[in-house]
Amino acid sequence: MHLPMRLLLPLLFLGPGVIACGDDASNQPPTVDATISAPTALVAGATGTLTISASDPDGDPLTYTWTQVDPNTPGTWVGGSTGATAQWYSPVVATQTAFTFHVSVTDGVNPPVVRTVTLPVSVPRYGADVQSLWGSAQCTGCHGKAGNLSLAATSSHASLINVAAKACGTLHRVVPGDPDNSALVRKMEGTACGDRMPTGKPEYFDQHPGLNVLVRSWILAGAAND
């Protein structure tokens, strides 16, 4: 039997009596590192960088897809989740929580190669994580000394916890366990209580949204002075 020429053209002869269709039969899957490069731990609201190294033996372009698979409450990808490197910060947490991620790498020909990593996210500590943001946000410029509200390191915690916020009706500045009803959070997010903080730069916490997660997590976990 003679095959029509239009059927013979796509065939590639590999040896006597052996025929394979097209070029894909010899295409190799991507070579992907066994492990994802990631922080060993992360504080809630802080941005972590995840990186996977991969190459393709055939020179095919690679597509990367990062996915948070556990727990169900999603964090935030910063700048997208489709490159060899991705950045992410957690949602609000009240206890240390393990987050699991997959990265899928595909050349568009072979099945995707998947790698997994688990990243523990901890509750922020006041002294190490929260206090420093008052300086970086320039809040201490208005509240740096003892007085109505001091955010100086030696007095800030006592100035915040269960202290009435005069501009916010019956709200207290920080209500341990209740970030939604803490005047500090409302001032940071601009949802109530007069002028948004920090004075002169009200967009600061929109530009650094992970800091809202950090403060909310600290309050939700009990607002300890640790």
Image (cartoon, grey):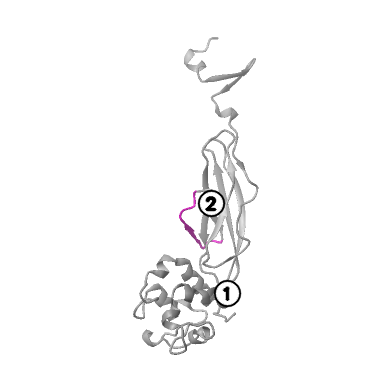
Q: Which residue is mark 1?
A: 128
Q: Amino acid at mark 2?
A: Thr
Q: Which residue is mark 2?
A: 85
Q: Position of residue 134 (x, y in %)?
A: 47, 76
Q: Which of 51 and 172 lies nearest the eye of the viewer? A: 51
Q: Position of residue 55 (x, y in %)?
A: 58, 40
* Residue 222 falls left or right of residue 184: right
Instruction: Name the residue rendered at 40%, 77% in the picture.
Output: 187
| Label 2 – label 1 distance at C-alpha | 27 Å
Given contact means CB atoms under 8 Å apart, are the residues at marks 2 and 1 in contact? no
Residue 27 quadrant: top right
Name the element at disc 1: helix
**Quadrant (top left, top right, bottom left, bottom right) of the C terminus:** bottom right
* Residue 25 falls left or right of residue 183: right
Does the magenta portion include 212?
no
Q: Which of 68 and 207 lies nearest the eye of the viewer? A: 207
Q: Amino acid at mark 1?
A: Ala
Q: Position of residue 48 (x, y in %)?
A: 55, 60
112 to 124, vertically: above or below: above
Q: Which of 28 and 112 lies nearest the eye of the viewer? A: 28
Q: Which mark is residue 24?
A: none
Q: Residue furthest top?
A: 1
Does the magenta portion include 78?
yes
Q: Residue furthest bottom?
A: 147
Q: Which residues make up the magenta segment?
A: 71-82
Dominant secondary structure of the residues highlighted in magenta in the image: loop
**Quadrant (top left, top right, bottom left, bottom right) of the N terminus:** top right
167 to 131, vertically: above or below: below
Q: Position of residue 58 (x, y in %)?
A: 57, 33
Instruction: Name the residue rendered at 65%, 47% in the picture.
Output: 34
